Image (tube, coloured by chain):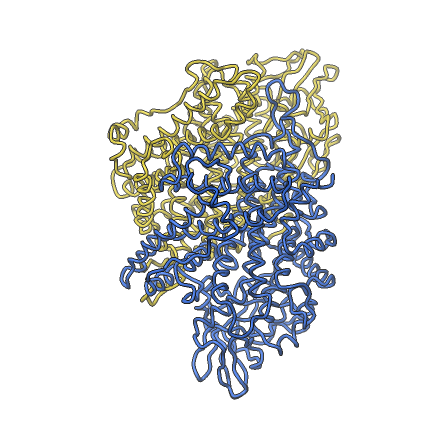
Chain colours: A blue, B yellow
């Protein structure tokens, strides 16, 4: 394997971003046996292997990343997202199990708990001495968390909480770590006492003893075989009046004091619920990041294979043609590679925002709420866009490798199967895009909500007002691009970044304005129907907004690069991303007079040209991704590189 | 489970088509244990189970379907495709393994062999006494079969053929039945003798003895874990000067006589090759049919779940909303259901054509060549379109069921993983669409070819001529629809079937004409570049042609239905299919002045309206698919039906 060129290394630098150090540390230290699996192992063997690898991760100190330094944590909060992302280059079962342990379970203890929980549990969590679960989803309620049925009832007689699953649909399900390993679970339940009901809270509940025996009153079942993630032991919990001490309530945002009284810094129950959920937003940041990494690895494999594999002779040519020289093959892989670059840069940006908002202590009462809501909106959208991109890209990569792509040792199929569920866990993507729309359509100060179509309907119905449409755009850093593009819409070159950005802006703005107008007609009687009829429009507006954010983030990162060949190359890559996105929505641009038919055809021609151009840069573009080479074991992607004969 | 309504049964009749009998027999007789697997079994257990099920199929006499009656076969040739399709409602590993045994292996013996092979082997093949492989693909050559490297050299001294793999890339790979069960293999190899080289031929080669021991000179390896089809024992064969008697050559289209002379009814080597391949076209018909069935089963599961699952309350409503009442959910599933209906009707049509051309003996010299080439073109395209549809649809169905869709017992994930490879086996879909384009762009009498971009380039370069564009359309049966639509393009109602058809025709015709013009500029020096630059255009033209064929087939089947509520319903379903296809290519229609912006928006509005309308017909639409209820074991799709509260 040849070493990356200076241009590739400069690209990698741009992609590494702020957390270059932990990326580099991971790249240098990670061993295949830490993070890879064997294709074809039985479910039991995969679970055992992954549990063992969690131990290795802990031994290597990686379990401490992002936890408070006061309790032995290392690096900062954002770094934990980046570490999760880097684990996306390994086996995704391990990535998800580590995410459950250190992110969801550990994160809930850290973020929803208080000092007594931190002192008692964090060290054991970071070292993997106690494995745990994050028990939120129920059979009856996945997306609609606010309506879960599990109850936690305070019993003043014993100063305990009684955890109960009143119905079969209250059973917690798809819970990672549940079927095999968890000893403790963070259980989300409706908290109530003689005083009243206080909404959803999280309680630490022991589910197995030290010997692994299920605790009395707890029923655990195995979710069994799944579409992927075979190494993650998903299962169900149900509770039959299980008693835990009052102190097991993770009470940062609401607890019961020694007098049995409910106390909370946030009076409004709805707001409290969404504040708690908002605290956990890192999970969504991570899922998007991990999916993006998996997509990049799949592209590396398919592109290396596409540069070696030959099939069919050109007339008069003795040697067969390298398949990546075919336009159709370039079209399959290069726009997806360009999108992967753009999404990786957007992922860096959202991670930085998370670090700024959640990674440092804000003085009480100064928690930047609007910025927090804006971030949550963006996280939701980016997670949806990136995970769908990953599902689609890994599929395309698999097909691009033909039969070889279907053989497990070539590392594509397990990844494809695993990443599938990323589109529906940590928020169903369709529901998340509605959350984006809701974020855009309602004023931030009034917005507290994971959302539903229906809920969105009632909410906006109540809030119809002037200034409904609020956005987060028009970044100063990109003003220069805008100025350059201004006033020559129909003359701009296709590769003009300013023109591309203005197309993204026009799509996002117009979609949002028109959906806002449409929804403003809602009243109590027609709300559901009106909203439901506009649902595709709502989803389009959400997607257009996120696409615009992605391009802005990517162009900003590009603008910050030092001048040179890597910057030039990334500029062309982002141009391919932008044009591909415009091409997908060509009909919209035509319908709305933003493209005439001549320019519309030019978009396609420009994409084809760019594919041909970037074909020659594929080695650098792949090396620039910075994927640890030792994790690429696919025989079709290793060995000598060959070059095109085109 | 309630019984299907009369309307659903009438729909089913329309979908059952000509082979209603074997469909009905299968529906009534099939037991889950014949054709279903257990999720989460190990690869070894799955292989064992599937091999056992092959035995059951044989015991039930289903192995005989489509073989010549003279040797104990039953039903007709077309029925074997329909049986394969029905097996798509069961486990796809079994379907594929049965396809390898009875279709590819058995079919090659039946179609490429002569009486001595039939007498000696067919009974054992139909009863599963001898399991076999179809060894065509090599490591070096998948799509480009004509360039495989395995050799079969005639040795006159011993009157034997010597089968040899001269290089590692000559190794046969991904061969079904190879890793575990095959005793005989149909091996494709370059036939040669002292006289010269005769191109690719098929030879029966024993690969294991009766005790399962590998034959001398044969090396067998296991392809190991794959992305799906765990019950199929794919593996590799390589041959080190393996000797078989001359009689093992399947010599219908070319053989060696007792004097050691090569004899063939077809002089031209190229034509002989493509005639042999053409004989095997049933494999592609079957793969498309099987994928279509899997997609329909996935839709059944997702639609039943979507009708039961509730999430989020509408304002003022006590009960949560049934998720299929959301427009976004309808949009995910109903256009795909409509497409599934259309493709199923097109599949019936191609199966009838296959039966007419390959299912009866044609007097020597009267083999309808042009019709044969036309059919092959259509089979290639339909296979590509249907398998991609299946991959996409099963994925959408999985996502529509959220976390529950990811649990294996709900029958979606294994099917999704299995069907994945349908897009690249029996012809890579992209290569197949090029074959379609080639079929359309060259005169039928000159067309002999599986194709490559490059080969296409050289071929068309040679054949540039007037009358280049030849098509197979303008069916008499649909003339009435055309007449009605004529002359009022901009006024036709969106649901006017004639207008829809004319849109499909315009898209297909224009794309083909323009691609023809573009390619006509090719000469020896610029051919590859010119073709490569037009590759996306070529693929679009191919797809547009196949879409048109599908709509024509579906509209014809619809026209033949007796008047009544089922016909009305299917009409609306086909309208949804047609509009969805038009919507996908909206940009094209706008760019080419076939839609103005007002009508373009109306297409989307009409789709939304139709989704809302058909939502109420979902029970009948699902029942109309005629899927054996006993094969639906997914807990989320069984049990009581509920209805919408919308």
Q: In x, y percent, where is residue B356?
A: 42, 25
Judging depth in this view, the residue of B394 and A428 nearest the camera is A428
Q: In x, y percent, where is residue B594?
A: 33, 32
**Position above or below: B249 against B604:** above
How many marks on residues?
0
Q: In x, y percent, where is residue B581?
A: 38, 38
**Position above or below: B469 against A197:** above
* Residue occupying image coordinates x 49% and y 59%: A427
Figure quadrant of the N terminus of chain A: top right
Q: Is residue B475 left or right of residue A35?
A: left
Judging depth in this view, the residue of A202 and A617 nearest the camera is A617
Judging depth in this view, the residue of A57 and A244 nearest the camera is A57
Figure quadrant of the C terminus of chain A: top right
Judging depth in this view, the residue of A325 and A548 nearest the camera is A548
Q: Residue A332 lies in what quarter of the image?
A: top right
Q: Is residue A108 left or right of residue B325?
A: right
Can the viewer see residue B57 in this picture?
no
Q: Is residue B383 left or right of residue A23?
A: left
Can the viewer see residue B565 in this picture?
yes
* Residue occupying image coordinates x 28% and y 62%: A523
Q: In x, y percent, where is residue A594?
A: 39, 40
**Position above or below: A237 against B295:** below
């Amino acid at each position: 394997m040849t070493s990356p060129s200076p241009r590739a290394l400069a690209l990698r630098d741009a992609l590494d971003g702020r957390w270059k150090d932990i990326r580099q540390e991971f790249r240098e230290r990670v061993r295949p046996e830490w993070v890879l699996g064997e294709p074809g192992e039985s479910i039991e063997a995969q679970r055992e292997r992954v549990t063992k690898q969690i131990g290795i991760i802990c031994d290597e100190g990686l379990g401490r990343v992002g936890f408070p330094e006061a309790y032995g944590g290392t690096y900062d909060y954002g770094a934990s997202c980046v570490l999760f992302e880097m684990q996306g280059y390994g086996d995704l079962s391990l990535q998800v199990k580590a995410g459950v342990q250190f992110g969801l379970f550990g994160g809930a203890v850290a973020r929803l708990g208080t000092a007594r929980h931190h002192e008692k549990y964090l060290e054991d969590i970071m070292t993997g001495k106690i494995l745990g679960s994050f028990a939120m989803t129920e059979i009856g309620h996945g997306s609609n968390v606010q309506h879960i049925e599990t109850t936690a009832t305070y019993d003043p007689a014993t100063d305990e909480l009684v955890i109960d699953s009143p119905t079969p649909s209250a059973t917690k399900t798809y819970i990672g770590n549940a079927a095999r390993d968890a000893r403790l679970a963070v259980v989300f339940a409706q908290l109530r006492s003689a005083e009243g009901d206080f909404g959803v809270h999280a309680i630490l509940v022991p589910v197995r003893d030290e010997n692994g025996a299920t605790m009395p009153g707890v029923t655990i079942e195995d979710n069994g075989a799944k579409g992927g993630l075979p190494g993650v032991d998903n299962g169900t919990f149900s509770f039959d009046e299980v008693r835990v001490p009052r102190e097991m309530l993770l009470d940062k945002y609401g607890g019961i004091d020694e007098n049995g009284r409910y106390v909370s810094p946030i009076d409004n129950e709805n707001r409290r619920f969404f504040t708690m959920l908002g605290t956990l937003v890192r999970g969504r940041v991570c899922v998007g990041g991990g999916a993006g990494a998996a997509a990049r690895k799949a592209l590396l494999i398919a592109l290396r294979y596409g540069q070696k594999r030959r099939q069919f002779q050109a007339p008069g040519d003795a040697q067969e043609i390298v398949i990546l020289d075919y336009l159709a093959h370039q079209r399959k892989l290069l726009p997806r590679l360009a999108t992967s670059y753009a999404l990786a840069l957007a992922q860096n940006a959202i991670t930085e925002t998370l670090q700024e908002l959640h990674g440092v202590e804000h003085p009480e009462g100064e928690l930047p709420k609007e910025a927090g809501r804006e971030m949550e909106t963006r996280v939701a959208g980016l997670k949806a866009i990136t995970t769908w991109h990953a599902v689609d890209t890994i599929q395309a990569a698999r097909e691009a490798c033909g039969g070889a792509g279907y053989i497990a040792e070539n590392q594509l199929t397990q990844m494809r199967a695993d990443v599938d569920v990323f589109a529906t866990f940590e928020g169903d993507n369709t529901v998340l895009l509605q959350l984006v729309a809701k974020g855009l359509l309602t004023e931030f100060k009034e917005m507290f909500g994971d959302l539903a179509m229906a809920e969105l309907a009632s909410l906006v119905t109540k809030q119809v007002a002037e200034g409904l449409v609020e956005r987060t755009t028009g970044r100063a850093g990109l003003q220069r691009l805008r100025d350059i593009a201004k006033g020559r819409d129909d003359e701009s070159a296709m590769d003009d970044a300013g023109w591309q950005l203005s197309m993204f802006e026009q799509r996002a703005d117009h979609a949002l304005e028109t959906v806002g107008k449409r929804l403003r007609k809602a009243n109590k009687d027609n709300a559901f129907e009106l909203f439901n009829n506009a649902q595709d429009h709502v989803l389009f507006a959400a997607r257009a907004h996120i696409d615009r954010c992605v391009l802005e983030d990517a162009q900003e990162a590009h603008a910050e690069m030092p001048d040179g060949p890597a910057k030039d190359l990334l500029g062309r890559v982002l141009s391919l991303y932008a044009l591909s996105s415009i091409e997908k929505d060509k009909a919209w641009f035509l319908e709305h007079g933003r493209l005439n038919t001549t320019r519309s055809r030019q978009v396609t021609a420009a994409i084809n040209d760019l594919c041909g151009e970037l074909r020659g840069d594929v080695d650098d573009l792949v090396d620039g991704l910075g994927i640890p080479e030792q994790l690429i074991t696919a025989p079709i992607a290793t060995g000598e590189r060959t070059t095109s004969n085109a």
